[in-house]
Image: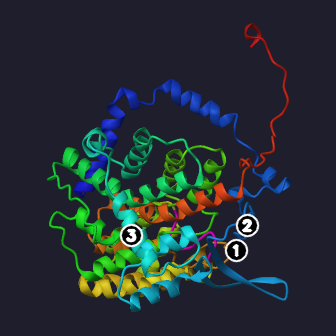
Amino acid sequence: MKNKELRIMKGVTNIMSNPFSKITPEISELSNLCKKNSLIDPTLYDKYEVKRGLRDISGKGVLAGLTGISDIISSKSINGEEHPCEGKLYYRGIDVENIITGISRENRFGFEEVAYLLLFGELPDAKELNRFNRILVNYRSLPTGFVRDVIMKAPSRDMMNALARSVLTMYSYDDHADNTSLPNALRQSLQLLALFPLLSVYGYQAYGHYHDNKSLHIHAPKPELSTAENILHILRPDSQYTPLEAKILDVALILHAEHGGGNNSTFTTHVVTSSGTDTYSTIAAALGSLKGPKHGGANIKVVQMFEDMKANIDDWTDQSSVKDYLTRLLNKEVFDRMGLIYGMGHAVYSLSDPRAKVLKRFVESLSREKNRADEFELYLLVEKLGPEIIGKERRIYKGVSANIDFYSGFVYKMLDLPLELYTPLFAIARMAGWAAHRMDELINTNKIIRPAYKAVSEFQEYVPLENR
């Protein structure tokens, strides 16, 4: 068993032996009672035309709002009928593939420019971009004692929880924490955008030091570096990285920065903002959503799946062996026995996820630099065979293709980033989108989001305690 797995199992043992965390027989009994009296007949969802997950069976989402921040294209209307098409993602009306192509041609970093675009609705000129970068640099400094008093104390084994705790604690350092005016909410959002890399990496390093006996390295960010460069600089003990490593991390941040108002964490941002609460509470709620393995943690599962695949297939180029593994995967016979090929399929896209297509081009270059081209070929083979096997083994209502999680985990692994930081990296990027959507909600709406739930319980009379 690997060291990481041993640590996890040790952590589980400690939790179960801790009275604070113990599930007693009484709690188990109450849990069964809760389940017994809360189960709803599945046929009622069809009867009342309830869109579970706010989506119909074809994957089309319920229209819950309007936004100009981003757009996702997965189908085209032909003669009044919707037909799947190659996926497209637009930031403020600009194709994200064109953004990355333009930035790559100019050989510069683009995440900050994309954050500006998402927040303010237009591409900055050189002067505006420099001013925006200066603002982020000025905000990239934690309050005095924050690292010692907050991050270093009771370090969490889960970096998303540690990040959320840090965000909520920052409320105490803000003299205008509850002011929800647009200028103040923007100021708070930009501060969090600038600080997320520090909060994430320092949280990881604190946990590694106190629980894994690793040397503690706390590097201060450098003002001349981009967000992607600073992440690698403050994470690595020697602060060294190659230009290609930093460039690919920058591309990954751009691709994760925003994905429409309907994704779970962004919708959470809209819902919580609509209640009138503060920025810190709103972003902490979004972080809680993103932590879920059905949302932000999927690329970890992809990496773990491939590790299991490589350990159980002698010849990675043998299609029949890979097919057999994927079939057994779907039949719950290998890996985690959940019956899923992780990284395959998406709630919206069918023929292709444009983010996966873009990232794939850079993955090939990085795999050559890291001498892992054979592993990249295995990814290509699974990407080719996966949809075919899923179509054969499952009843599906739309196309299946590789999503961004399929390649992002491989990228992070080649960058020697720890698994614990995979989802926080997603949060570092998505903070730009969350900030834009919080502004969107504050500007355009003044109504709390409160969808309807139909009650299907039977009426009953109150029975006095002595008669029960």
Can you tell which quarter of the image residue 82 is in? bottom right
Q: Specify the amino acid type for callout 2.
A: Ile
Residue underneath mark 1: 397
| Residue 133: mark in rendering | 3
Mark 2 is surrounded, within 10 Å at the Cα level, by few (under 14), some (14 to 19) or many (20 or more) other residues, namely few
Residue underneath mark 2: 57
Gap in angstroms between the C-alphas marked 3 and 2: 44 Å
Q: Specify the amino acid type for callout 3.
A: Asn
Q: Earlier in the sequence, mark 3 or mark 1?
A: 3
At a point 46% along the width and 89% down the height, the residue shown is 101
Place of residue 455 in the rendered image (x, y in percent of width and height, measured from the top left): 81, 40
Q: Is 224 situated above or below 263?
A: below
Place of residue 109 in the rendered image (x, y in percent of width and height, measured from the top left): 37, 79
* Horizontal relation, residue 123 to residue 105: left or right: right
Dot 1: element: loop
Does 144 appear in magenta? no
Q: Earlier in the sequence, mark 1 or mark 2?
A: 2
Residue span colored magenta: 339-349
Place of residue 262 in the rendered image (x, y in percent of width and height, measured from the top left): 64, 63
Which one is in front, 322 or 350? 350
Which one is in front, 400 or 166? 166
* Horizontal relation, residue 399 to residue 376: left or right: right
